[in-house]
Every structure is written in structure tokens, then in C-alpha cells.
Image (tube, rainbow, N blue to C red):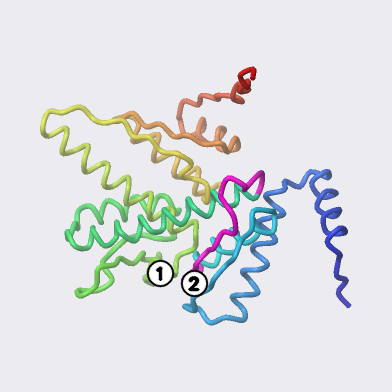
Amino acid sequence: MDELLTTDEMAQADRLAITGGVPGITLMENAGRAVADVVARRVPLGTRVAVVAGPGNNGGDGFVAARLLSARGYPVVLLLVGSRERLKGDAAEAAERYVVVHLQRETLRRELEQYERRHSSPLLDEAGHLLDRLTGGRFTALRPAGADTRTLVAVRADGEELGPEQLSEGTADQVFLALRLAGIRQLQGERRAAGLPAVPVVLDDVLMTFDDARAGAALTVLAELAADWQVLLFTHHGHLAPAARTAGAHVVELGAPAPVLAEPA
């Protein structure tokens, strides 16, 4: 028989887990994933799902569930009760992760449509080579889904083609990065041909959903590109620093920001 905890008991269990060294955001990710798993078992793929999130930690669980369900291919509508300014701590971080992933997926969808409309085969070839490296050979190419469509598919090493809605969150981010880097490389080549200097490339936390192997592969690619361009990668994930050094990148640790002092009344 399963034991159900009261609200106070659940709060105490969370406090004990955090005191024991489990980050609060990890507990939130686990709770949101459990909700997403239940929805996926009970609701057919493609069904529109509405997630109502409050400003507290339960709302943070909702942001996680919404992000994961969207990554699995469910059309998700997320409703926030209250203002974003009320989100604090782990709930604010979960909300930020949802917003970042949502914007990336929407941008990826628009980029795929634009690339298909432009019939940019050389660019897609370059993006496919980069995707091959970023995924360790699991995905080897990007190509149009069909003559009458405006979307792309990612091609697995075994030849299976997956559309954007079928990709995991991490793989979708790797496709997005491969397309961005291929487009930037094309832009830099055009500037060089016109006698113009290369522009700096600034990336902010683009490896958030990458596992260690794919993060290492991405850092190696970025370090190679940095031989020709200035590449700046910002991240608050400290575990990436050793992998970046191994890839040959120069790592600068900024440290904690200085406290902001309130002006006297």
C-alpha cells in the first residue's frame, strides 16, 4: 500500500532531502517529470495539454512538466497564476528553463522553415556534419521532410528520420546549435569574401540540456571555430569548465557578483 504524505510532511521531506545534499531544483525536476510521465501514459500524443502554474514550488513542478511534455510532442499551453516577479528560487529557475527551451524550439521551427524555403543545401550539409559531431554520430544529417513541406527531419545513423516534434529536448537543442553554427559559418565566409572582419560569436548557456559526452563534443567544435572567430560562451554550469579546458578553450571564472547595496532612505 502506498503511503500519502500530508502537505507538512512533504515539506519536511523536501527540507531533509535538501539538507542531505539534494539540490532543490533536482527535486523539482523529478516531481515535474513524474507528472509528465503520468500525462504521457494517460493522454494520447498530440492532445493539447493545459498546465496551470502558481508562483510557489508546485508551480515550479508545473513548469518542468510543461517543458518535458512539450519536448515529447504535446502542444502545451502554460498559464501562470500571478506575476512572474513572484517566482522565487527553484520555481524561478524552472520557469526560466521552460522559457528558454520554449523560445529555442520556436526559433528552431522558424529557422527550419526558413532554411527549407531558401533551399540552402550547402548550409544543411554543413549543419548535418556539425550535428554528426555534436551527437557523437547518433544523428548524421538534416534534410527536407518532403518536396511539399517546409520542415526538416534529423536523420539517425540507422537512416530513420525524425521530425522536430519527435526529438528529445537535448537533441532538439543540438539540431538548433548545428543550424546556428552552420549559418554563422556561412555569414563569416561571406564577410571574409567581402573583405570584412569576422564578427564575434556570443553564446549563452547553449549546453544546458547536453549530457557530458555531447557537451564535450560541442566544446571541441566551438574551440576549433575559435581559431578563426572570437567565440564567447557564457554558462553558470561549473562542471563544464574542465571539459572546456580539455577541449583547448580558455576558461575565465567570474565568481559571485558583488552584493547590491540599497541606497539609504
Q: Which residue is mark 1?
A: 158
Crowding around mark 2 (Cα neighbors within 10 Å: few <14, some 14 to 19, many 20+) is: many
| Identity of the residue drawn at 83% across and 43% down | 19
Quadrant (top left, top right, bottom left, bottom right) of the C terminus: top right
The location of residue 58, given as percent across then percent down, is 69, 59
Q: Is residue 74 magenta?
A: yes
Marks 2 and 1 in Cβ contact (< 8 Å): no
Q: Earlier in the sequence, mark 2 or mark 1?
A: 2
The location of residue 233, given as percent across then percent down, is 44, 34
| Identity of the residue drawn at 51% across and 36% down | 235
Q: Amino acid at mark 2?
A: Tyr
Using the image, determine if residue 13 lies above or below residue 85. Answer: below
**Of 233 and 189, the residue lying toward us:** 233
Q: Which mark is residue 195?
A: none
Using the image, determine if residue 78 lies above or below residue 213. Answer: below
Residue stretch rendered in magenta on the structure: 72-90
| Identity of the residue drawn at 64% across and 17% down | 264
| Identity of the residue drawn at 19% across and 74% down | 147
Q: Is residue 93 magenta?
A: no
Using the image, determine if residue 135 lies above or below residue 46. Answer: above
Q: Nearer the viewer, mark 2 or mark 1?
A: 2
Q: Amino acid at mark 1?
A: Asp
Using the image, determine if residue 249 lies above or below residue 108. Answer: above
**Of 40 and 88, the residue lying toward us:** 88
Farthest residue toward the top? 264
Q: Which residue is mark 2?
A: 74
Q: Secondary structure at mark 1?
A: loop
